[in-house]
């Protein structure tokens, strides 16, 4: 999974993973122990409890990793380097 920097992108990634596995929102909700609407809310980037997020990820065989999302200045300079300098 790519890095999610907000609830909307995390929800979209969870939806994509669920669909790739051929699972329904109801299937995830049953394993999480919540209503299907709660999974729909999660996938839409709405506010749901953290334990719901964690259980939904686990039901799809995924976990959560905390990564450094700061901009790497060396990489940034490569992106904006003049073509004349290469």
Image (cartoon, helix red, strand yellow):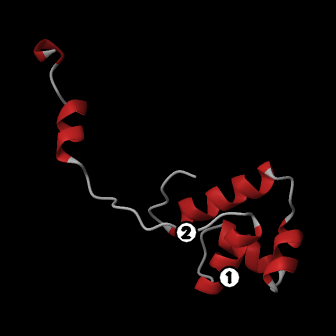
Horizontal side, residue 75 vs residue 55: left or right: left
Q: Which of 47 and 13 is in front in this view?
A: 13
Of badges 1 and 2, nearer the viewer stands 2
Circle 1 Cα neighbour tier, 10 Å, few/some/many (<14 / 14–19 / ≥20)? some
Rendered residue at 75%/80% (across/down): 38
Which of disc 2 and disc 1 is earlier in sequence?
Answer: 1
- Judge left or right: residue 75 versus residue 14: left
Left or right: where 79 falls relative to 85: right
Q: In which quarter of the image is residue 42?
A: bottom right
Q: Position of residue 10 (x, y in %)?
A: 57, 63
Q: Is residue 27 above or below residue 4?
A: below
Number of marks in the image? Answer: 2
Numbered label attached to residue 74: none
Q: Nearer the viewer, residue 7 or 20?
A: 20
Q: Which of 74 and 80 is in front in this view?
A: 74
12 lies above or below 55: above
**Residue 56 locus on image (x, y percent):** 71, 73
Question: Would you name the residue on which mark 2 appears?
Answer: 64
The image shows residue 81 at horizontal and vertical percentages of 16, 26
Dot 2 lies on which element? Answer: loop
Q: Is mark 1 on a helix, strand or loop?
A: helix
Q: Which residue is drawn at 86% across and 59% down?
A: 23
Residues packed near mark 2 inside 10 Å, few (<14), some (14 to 19) or many (20 plus): few
Q: Distance between the residues labelled 1 and 2?
A: 13 Å
Q: What's the residue at 16%, 14% (across, down)?
A: 86
Q: Could you tell me residue 27's position as x and y percent?
A: 88, 70
- Please name the residue that numbered disc 1 is placed on: 52
Contact (Cβ within 8 Å) of mark 1 with mark 2: no
């Amino acid at each position: 999974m790519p890095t999610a920097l907000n609830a909307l992108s995390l929800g979209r990634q969870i939806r994509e993973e669920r669909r790739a596995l051929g699972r329904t929102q109801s299937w995830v909700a049953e394993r999480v122990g919540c209503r299907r609407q709660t999974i729909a809310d999660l996938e839409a980037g709405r506010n749901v409890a953290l334990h719901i997020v964690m259980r939904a990820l686990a039901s799809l065989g995924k976990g959560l990793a905390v990564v450094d999302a700061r901009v790497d200045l060396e990489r940034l300079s490569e992106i904006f380097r003049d073509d004349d300098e290469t």
